[in-house]
Amino acid sequence: MRNLLIMGLLIFGLSSCGGDTCQECTGTNSSGEMADFTVCDNDDGTTTRTNNTTNETTTDSLGYLESIVFLESLGLDCASN
């Protein structure tokens, strides 16, 4: 029973480590158009921003929080996904 508990904790720990830090930002932008973006932190000082409507992906030097604030300034709502 103890081994089963330890194995369960290890699996939980491994599955919760790593992964992408991403947020999806959706809504109507300041131009009145529907927008849907996903912003991910690349853990190297850059972010990847994907336009989910056009499937275009851009990597830039904006920090993760700066990217989120920029999209929110356009009128979008951002939430972790």
Image (spheres, helix red, strand yellow):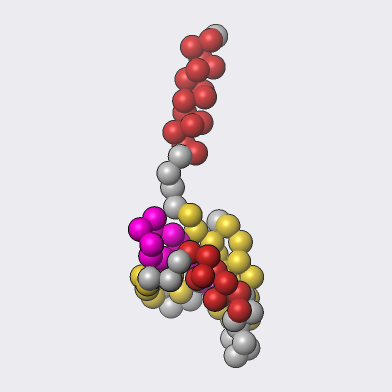
Does 4 lie within the magenta span?
Answer: no
Name the image quarter holding residue 75: bottom right
| Image quadrant containing the N terminus | top right
Q: At 43% across and 44% down in the image, what residue appears? A: 18
State the extent of the magenta-drawn residues as a range: 36-48
Image x and y of residue 35, in percent: 56, 78
Classify the position of the C terminus by image quarter: bottom right
Work out whether 43 lies above or below 69.
above
The number of numbered discs placed on residues in the rendered structure image is: 0
Q: Position of residue 77 (x, y in %)?
A: 64, 70
Residue 74: image quadrant is bottom right
Left or right: 66, with 79 as reference point: left
Q: x and y percent of residue 29 in the render?
A: 60, 83
Give the residue drawn at x 51%, y 31%. Answer: 12
Question: Image quadrant of residue 56?
Answer: bottom left
Residue 23: x and y in percent read 54, 61
Kindly give the residue lying farthest to the top in the view shown: 1
Q: Is residue 9 above or below residue 60?
A: above
- Residue at x-position 43% and y-position 71%: 62
Give left or right: position of 80 versus 13.
right
- Residue 47 part of the magenta-drawn span: yes
User: In the image, is 50 to the left or to the right of 74?
Assistant: left
Q: Residue at x 55, y 75 (%)?
A: 71
Predominant SS of the magenta segment = strand
